Amino acid sequence: MTYPDLGVAVVAISDDEWRVCDTRVPRSAPSLLGFVKQCGADFEVTQIGAPGRRTHCDRFRDALQRLAPGRA
């Protein structure tokens, strides 16, 4: 599933985990931004380049926004 307004593509890797990639880079280049995992009612965000640091969001879309390229 693609979220053009956020610049990300989301691929389910299990029932409660998703891989999030940057849609702005060519397919031949690394595009992985991070992962989102549903933990009960929350969504845990793991950003590539920030190992060990987790962010929690109430909504799936908010989790995707945390990973969106160019976010402030």
Image: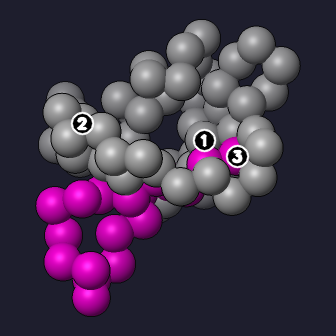
State yes or no: discs 1 and 2 in contact (Cβ < 8 Å). no
Label 1 vs 2, first from the N-terminus: 2
Write down the residue under mark 1: 36
Q: Is residue 32 above or below residue 33?
A: below
Q: Residues within 10 Å of mark 3 (few under 14, many from 20)?
A: some
Q: CA distance from mark 2 to mark 3?
A: 19 Å
Kind of residue at badge 2:
Leu
Residue drawn at x 78%, y 44% as measured from the top left: 15
x and y, in percent, of residue 47 in the image: 50, 49
Q: Secondary structure at mark 2?
A: loop
Q: Secondary structure at mark 3?
A: strand
Kind of residue at badge 1:
Val
Quarter of the figure that contains the C terminus: top left
Q: Secondary structure at mark 1?
A: strand
Q: Is residue 1 visible?
A: yes
Q: Which one is in front, 66 or 17? A: 17
